[in-house]
């Protein structure tokens, strides 16, 4: 199906368009909410072209939830950290990433 000159495929049936009641839409944008408990999706109705937002809950495994919380805690810690310490940590992360992406030349 083509809408506004772009090829799109229907993604969901069952979520009704608030404008016309049609049940087939396509997702234009998808991202987690700030608290990472829901997914915010911008949808486009394939019948009338109206855009609307849905918030969909999803379940995470305990391992995934712990990883998200660790990342959020690290982000909060970096935000309140003094600027010079933040720069030091950012440079260390950059150095580690660069070192792990290089091929190992220790065999010479």
Image (cartoon, helix red, strand yellow):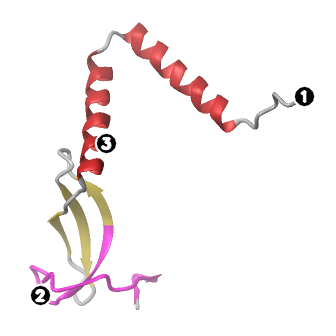
- The residue singled out by tag 2 in the image is 20
- The residue singled out by tag 3 in the image is 67
**Residue drawn at x 31%, y 29% as measured from the top left:** 75
**Residue drawn at x 32%, y 64% as measured from the top left:** 29
Vertical relation: 102 (above or below) 91: below
Nearer the observer: mark 3 or 1; the answer is 1
The residues bearing labels 2 and 3 have C-alpha atoms spaced at a distance of 41 Å
Q: Is residue 6 magenta?
A: yes
**Residue drawn at x 81%, y 28% as measured from the top left:** 106
For marks 2 and 3 on the same chain, the one whose residue lies earlier in the sequence:
2
The residues bearing labels 3 and 1 have C-alpha atoms spaced at a distance of 38 Å
Vertical relation: 92 (above or below) 58: above
For marks 2 and 1 on the same chain, the one whose residue lies earlier in the sequence:
2
Asked if disc 2 and disc 1 are in contact, CB closer than 8 Å, the reply is: no
- The residue singled out by tag 1 in the image is 108
For marks 3 and 1 on the same chain, the one whose residue lies earlier in the sequence:
3
Which segment did they paint magenta? Answer: 2-28
- Camera-side residue of 101 and 66: 66
Binning the other alpha carbons within 10 Å of mark 1 as few (below 14), some (14 to 19) or many (20 upward) gives few
Q: Position of residue 40 (x, y in %)?
A: 21, 60
On screen, residue 67 versus residue 102, left or right, reads: left
Asked if disc 3 and disc 1 are in contact, CB closer than 8 Å, the reply is: no
Asked where in the image residue 23 lies, by quadrant, the reply is bottom left
Disc 3, SS: helix
| Quadrant of the frame with the N terminus | bottom left
Q: Residue furthest right?
A: 108
């Amino acid at each position: 199906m083509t809408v506004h000159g772009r090829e799109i495929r229907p993604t969901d049936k069952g979520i009704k368009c608030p404008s016309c009641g049609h049940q087939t839409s396509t997702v234009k944008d998808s991202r987690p909410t700030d608290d990472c408990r829901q997914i915010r999706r911008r949808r486009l109705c394939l019948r009338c072209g109206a855009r609307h937002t849905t918030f969909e809950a999803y379940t995470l495994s305990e391992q995934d939830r712990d990883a998200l919380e660790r990342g959020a805690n690290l982000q909060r810690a970096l935000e309140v950290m003094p600027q010079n310490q933040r720069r030091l940590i950012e440079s260390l992360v950059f150095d580690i990433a660069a070192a792990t992406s290089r091929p190992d030349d220790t065999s010479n």
